[in-house]
Image: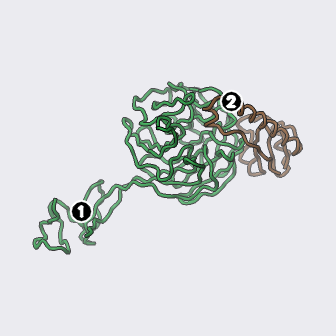
Amino acid sequence: MSGIISDNKSRSSGLVKAGAGGVPTIAGDKSPATAGDIWYNSSTTELRCYLPVAAWSAGGNLGESNRQNWGSGTQTAALVAGGDTPASDDTQEYNGSSWASTNATVKPAGGSHTMAGTQTSTLLNGGNWILATSETYDGSCWTAGTDTPGARYSAGGFGASATSNGVVGGWSGALEDDTWTWDGSSWSAVGLIPQGRYHFQTCGIVTAALAISGSLVWPTHVAEVDIFDGTSWSDTGNNYPLSISQGAAVGSTTDCFVAGGHDQAASPAGTTDKTYTYDGSSWSAGTAYPDDATQQASSCGVTSTSAFAMFGGKLSGSDTNLTYEWTDAVTNATITTSA
Amino acid sequence: MKYCTTTHSGYGFYTHADREAAHLSGHPGDVWCVGNNNSSWIERVGGTEKTLEEAQAIVDSTIADAQTTWDSLDDEDYKFHHPRPSTVSLPI
């Protein structure tokens, strides 16, 4: 369509005096607006729009480079603990721009535990050395929790807080398919996941969680995505587009974001920078992770469209302390032209 | 710093107050390091006190066993995902 605006009768360039041709005139910015809306702001004499903006941006670096750490919380109030190469017991808090160390975990230093919750209420379970121990973080210290019924390494974690948490699958010397939920006072054995696996991606809460892809006995991976309703797991039938392990996942059963991981189906198999979002029925490709492909990174965040961060992990060459934040938002913007 | 061996007993084994009172860290071989010479925690959890050298020897032995096991594994999946256990120097 050409750029002729009906009120600009001389068809000359310059000030647009009023909106026309279906573009509304508003003395300010439109509110509420829907992505894609266009209007003429008569106060600033600008053509404005409500524009979707989805992008990765660099955040503050972790205090140390490692992988197989775990994270919890949100992009502006995140928590990361442990990790490998070197084995670490460090705990750090993120405020949206920088990381600060706080009290270390107490379990033997290492990674591959599970963590879920908030920056002030997180439960950590299992980990390297195949542990059954759990610790809870209250915003300043880790304290001993109740052991899970079995010892696990690289299980999947989900939950909203240190008193509402879950652990599924993992490795105990063999693949496991148990699920245990924690209500703040005891662990309950609930449904078995249809296909026991480890190094997989999990997100959600104890009444609605997802288990995404993952590793079986090497080198077999599955793309299967299972959903948990608080009692039992079932196959969603909506396989993840890749067969990955050790990616990062955040969100809920109807609004989930997955990034990175080890893509066993790639040729050659290796780290991936691909991201996907899930709306409860299908997966959609997203913007690639901005750096070298990564796996074994931590993540935090609540939904696919709210701010989300990935930190640490193993790039294709070495471990990293980088943090990247994902923001999927809509914002007011001015439409300009260029010659 | 004091050192002991004891088995993690779960909830209440160490508390927020314990963490604020002194350094506390767990290590391979059920070895625990306790700051501020905090004998009361060791007594409460039924720990067996060790010297630094004794405690370090337990950790080293446990890790050496784990390294031997790791080196002998044919399970490439385990090796791919699970780093070879590395040495630990207990805090002093």
Question: For chain A, what colour was chosen?
Answer: green
At horizontal 40% and vertical 46% (from top left) the residue drawn is A286
Instruction: Reply above or below: A8 against A332.
Output: below
Q: Residues within 10 Å of mark 1 (few under 14, many from 20)?
A: many
Q: Residues within 10 Å of mark 2 (few under 14, many from 20)?
A: few
Front residue of B12 and A17: A17
Q: Inspect the image, locate mark 1, and give the three-letter code of the amino acid beneath it.
A: Trp
In whole angstroms, how far apart are the C-alphas of marks 1 and 2? Answer: 66 Å
**Residue A50 drawn at (x, y percent):** 30, 58
At horizontal 61% and vertical 41% (from top left) the residue drawn is A123
**Residue A74 drawn at (x, y percent):** 52, 50
Front residue of B67 and B49: B67
Residue A311's disc is none
Judge whether residue A87 can be spotted in this image: yes
Q: Using the image, name the chain to which the residue with label 2 belongs.
A: B
The residue identified by callout 2 is B73
Q: Inspect the image, locate mark 2, and give the three-letter code of the amino acid beneath it.
A: Leu
Callout 1: SS: strand
Residue furthest front as drawn: A268
Question: For chain B, what colour was chosen?
Answer: brown
Question: Taking A256 as reference, is A158 left or right?
Answer: right
Q: Quadrant of residue A109?
A: top right
Question: Taking A271 as reference, is B63 left or right?
Answer: right
Image quarter (top left, top right, bottom left or bottom right) of the N terminus of chain A = bottom left
Callout 2: SS: loop
**Residue A339 drawn at (x, y percent):** 25, 70
Front residue of A40 and A309: A309
Residue furthest left as drawn: A9
Residue A39's disc is 1
Judge whether residue A72 can be spotted in this image: no
